[in-house]
Amino acid sequence: MSLAWAVPFVDGPHPLVSWVLAAAAIILLGMGKSGFGSGIGVISSPLLILAVGSPQKALGSLLPLMLVADVLSIYHHWGTWDGKQMRRLVPASVVGIAVGAVLIFAMGDADEHGRALERTVGYICVVYPVGEFLKNRLFRKVAMGDRESGDAAICDRPLNDQSGIPGALSGAGVNPPAEPGAEPLTDVRGSLTRLFPVGAGFFAGVVSTLAHAAGPVITIYLLTQKLPRQTFIGTAVIYFFLVNFIKLVPYQMLGMLKVDNLELSLWLLPLIPVGTTLGAWLNRRMNDGNFRRLVLGLNTVTGISLILNWP
């Protein structure tokens, strides 16, 4: 194997552009894991698809890198997760992962050039900011409710942490007392309570398999649980690690973890600590709100380019 053959993108039409797109994808992934600009990591998938020209190769190459970043996050949050929430979410997510894998297989079989999967990732990227918007609205409602109930432990701004999850949640909150005449709704509420984690876990598994973009789904669910701040983060961290680890099985079966894909992962691996270091540095020096909105806007544009097959 010659070095020229081993270096990614050198045989492509625009090797420099491909390297810039790939490097940006991984650095932004690392920055998102550092907690700076929560949600920005979602742009990694469409950027890498544009760089390599294949959604299967891009998603397969990203998965090992995401696992490395997840392991680093687990180190900082070991033992802080909520086991009950994991038991609620993970089984449904496994089913969702299986469904996502079937969809990838079906799209790949129907379209040998991967355009169906590419467009699917594009649609997810376009819709993703809606999930972020809903998540942020829910966070503000939860925070306001806790302030009104006298919960002084709630943080006043989004958390910047290794998990990349905005949260700043603490305390279990105060549940309002049951109102007279509310008994007939008890069964309905109980059913919805049981179905909500199943639906969230299933949908997160599907979207994570298709585009590595389950962040808003799980964050919205965990926000509604009013977990203590550190438990919220730890639960999100271990959840994404387990989901990404489980995805290794269908990705391998679908041929998305081939040697050349893993080679690309190795070439890009050093950029993960570059991104996390840069994110941590920016955390101490600037507000990430405007940067996050910029990246989510670029994510939407990138998603549209995948849908329209441009450039």
Image: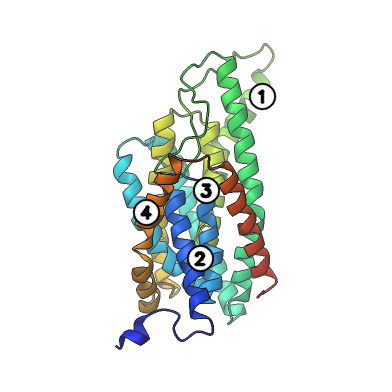
Secondary structure beneath label 1: helix
Marks 1/3: CA–CA distance: 31 Å
Q: Earlier in the sequence, mark 4 or mark 3?
A: 4
Which of the labelled discs sits on residue 222, or is there none? none
Residue of label 2:
101
Give the CA separation, mark 2 to mark 3.
18 Å
In the shown orientation, is residue 76 left or right of residue 155?
A: left
Q: Is residue 205 visible?
A: no
Q: Earlier in the sequence, mark 2 or mark 3?
A: 2
Q: Residues within 10 Å of mark 4 (few under 14, many from 20)?
A: many
Residue type pointed to by label 2: Ala
Amino acid at dot 1: Leu
- Location of mark 3 (residue): 215
Disc nearest the viewer among 2 and 3: 3
Residue matched to label 1: 185
* Of the image marks 1 and 3, the number of the one nearer the N terminus: 1
Earlier along the polypeptide chain: callout 2 or callout 1? 2
What type is the residue that disc 3 sits on? Gly
Looking at the image, tell me whether mark 4 or mark 1 is earlier in sequence order.
4
Q: For the residue labelled by badge 4, is the local secondary structure a helix, a strand or a loop?
A: helix
Q: Position of residue 65 (x, y in %)?
A: 38, 61
Local crowd at mark 1 within 10 Å, few (<14), some, or many (≥20)? few
Q: Position of residue 28 (x, y in %)?
A: 48, 56
